[in-house]
Amino acid sequence: MFTRVHDIKCALLWFWAVWLSVVVATNGCDLLKHWTILPAWWAFASGNYAAVAKVTSVYPGSSWISVLLFLGVIAWEGLAAILFWRAVVLWMRQREPAYAAVNVAIAVSMSLWAAFLVAEEVYVDFSVSSTHRQLLALSLLTLLVIHLLPEEVASKR
């Protein structure tokens, strides 16, 4: 299926674009469930809003803070998803790899994971820190793979 390193790099970009798109959709549905726009039985929802509300409840005014934070996260994830889709399209269209578009997409996603880690320190809740550290590391690994692996590898027959 993947005959060139260029194709493998493109598949990595596709993964991030698809995964982030699904995350945005499930988080969006979760917020709509919280607002009772979607019914309680709606299964396609992340459950992340309840986690955010629980973590932020240690501070006064947490109900509106939770909504603002969650909306911000969805917007940030949405921006990252759009940027990854843009990188995929540019990567597939151009003969030269679209490194600038990739760098922007990965920088936005890495900054999201880093922001989560900072928020976990502020709210002193480390229950999902390992997930965010892993996502940050995988984002960095993606950046390294895309920049350091040569586009063409000599065939060893």
Image (cartoon, rainbow, N blue to C red):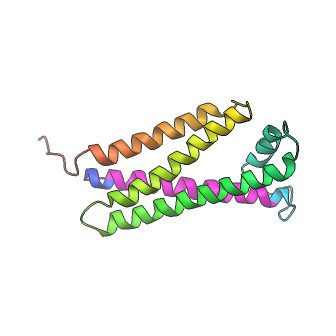
Residue 133 location (% of width, % of height): 55, 34
Does the stretch in magenta take in 13? yes
How many discs mark residues in the rendered view?
Answer: 0
> Residue shown at 76%/44% (left/top)?
52
Residue 68 position (above or below residue 50): below
Evaluate whether residue 139 shows in this view.
yes
Q: To which quarter of the image does residue 31 belong?
A: bottom right
Q: Is residue 35 or residue 152 the one in the foreground? A: 35
Residue that appears at 56% across and 54% down: 20
Residue farthest along the bottom direction in this orientation: 93
Task: Pick the residue in front: 64 or 130.
Answer: 64
Judge whether residue 1 can be spotted in this image: no
Q: Is residue 4 left or right of residue 53?
A: left
| Residue situated in front as seen by the camera: 103 or 50 | 103
In the image, which residues are magenta? 8-32
Left or right of 102 in this view: 27? right
Point 26% across, 44% down: residue: 149
In the figure, is residue 140 to the left or right of 128? left
Image quarter hosting the C terminus: top left
* Residue shown at 24% from the left, 66% from the top: 95
* Magenta: main secondary structure: helix
x and y percentages locating residue 102 in the rendered image: 39, 56
